[in-house]
Amino acid sequence: MAKAAPLSPLAPKSYVDCPPIEGVRFATAEAGIRYKGRTDVMLALLDKGTQVAGVFTKSKCPSAPVDWCRSKLKGGKARALVVNSGNANAFTGKNGVASTKQTAQIASKATGATAGEIFLASTGVIGEPLDATKFEGVLDKLVKKAAPEGILEAARAIMTTDTFPKVATATCEIGGVSVTINGMAKGAGMIAPDMATMLSFVFTDAPIAASALQALLSKSVMGSFNSITVDSDTSTSDTLMLFATGAAAKRGCPKIATATDRRLVAFKKALDALLLDLAHQVVRDGEGCRKFVEIRVEGAASAAAAKKIGLSIANSPLVKTAIAGEDANWGRVVAAVGKAGEKADRDKLAIWFGDFRVANKGLRDLSYDEAKVSAYMKGEKIDMRVNVGVGKASWTVWTCDLTKEYVAINGDYRS
């Protein structure tokens, strides 16, 4: 295995304390799937009655676990989640299908749940068969030792090139009763989500029906996971799942049947904030990154156009390397706006780095001070704002810089 990358300089100084959620228990183990000397399997046990929703990669080459989860999601119920790192079980043909089925059967036997209530996810190398027999015996042990407090270790077990585990928590009220939302994510490279991130799992004790959860989740990812990029590559394994145990109903929390229920206002805000937090952590762990970059596009013809322009800027290797070099090269931003294929007025275009307007009305800003802008570019967080001058719509996307370390990490990935 390639040497682990050093901790991202943008990593959190400490991890949030995620309070246990009734109805959810975690356990991890070393199954030797690819890595040695580290955990690579995570099991989440869910109480009977847990509702589930999910969004998955739109890649035309999805992994076998993605296909499995999609087929089981229709049932709306979940009892267990099994996740492994080191092998994506993607592009593995009939063997991959058989492996997911065998893994679910092993998990079913260990947990007592039906295979239709077992959800699977895998992350790691693409194209290598996943030996499901490695789960034999391991899942039985995990069932016995699963505990409510294990979300941080669970997040650590699903890491690949990540340099830190990603967790988040939020609380809110539904009908005057407090509910909790906890989440974990993994991802550092192959990040240009087209639904979610590589892998993310969110848990709540709120009593919300699966159909309502699905509507909430599908909408929430648009402004969070679907608005980040590290390297413009969408994974075959993108999976985001939301599990609701409903345990808060015992404390008087009303049961929610539809996503339009007015009592969900606070829950929606909390879910949006939690997913955005996790999405930002993914960007802050971008392979080899040194800068966290926020790009806000304004004055666009539509929100969709603003997003497309924003991602064109965020995915530009020239823009990203300029940021790595601490160079406010607005010429590269102009080029990225122009290639997006959306309406933009060259002679009204304005660009800011932080509070410094570097270009205005199609020209370098007359007040541009290179020394001040250069000093700003040395910071860890870079805010960019671009007004394309054709409308009133806006969108924000997040990315990171592109460094030599990114090439080194990915050049050595299968070594």
Image (cartoon, helix red, strand yellow):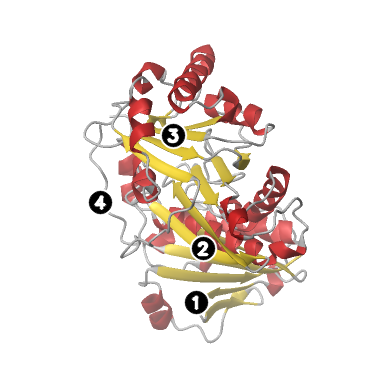
Q: Residue type at mark 1?
A: Gly
Give the label, 3 or 1, closer to the camera: 3
Q: Identify the mark at residue 86; answer none if there is no mark.
A: none
User: Residue visible at 25% across and 35% down?
Assistant: 2
Q: Residue type at mark 3?
A: Val
Residue at the spot of label 4: 6
**Could you tell which of marks 2 and 4 lies nearer the N-terminus?**
4
Residue at the spot of label 3: 83
Q: Nearer the viewer, residue 176 or 223?
A: 176
**Could you tell which of marks 2 and 3 lies nearer the N-terminus?**
3
Q: Nearer the viewer, residue 384 or 199?
A: 199
Q: Nearer the viewer, residue 317 or 173?
A: 173
Helix, strand or loop status at disc 1: loop
Q: Residue type at mark 4?
A: Pro
Q: Residues under labels 2 and 3: Cα distance?
A: 23 Å
User: Residue visible at 76% across and 52% down?
Assistant: 258
Residue at the spot of label 1: 354
Q: 74 left or right of 194?
A: right
**Could you tell which of marks 3 and 1 lies nearer the N-terminus?**
3
Q: Quadrant of residue 143?
A: top left
Q: Residue type at mark 2?
A: Ala
Disc 3 + disc 1, Cβ < 8 Å:
no
Q: Nearer the viewer, residue 149 or 157?
A: 149
User: Residue visible at 43% across and 43% down?
Assistant: 25
Give the label, 2 or 3, closer to the camera: 2
Disc 2 + disc 3, Cβ < 8 Å:
no
Q: Position of residue 129 (x, y in %)?
A: 42, 18
Q: Residues under labels 1 and 2: Cα distance?
A: 29 Å
Q: 249 left or right of 228?
A: right
Disc 1 + disc 2, Cβ < 8 Å:
no
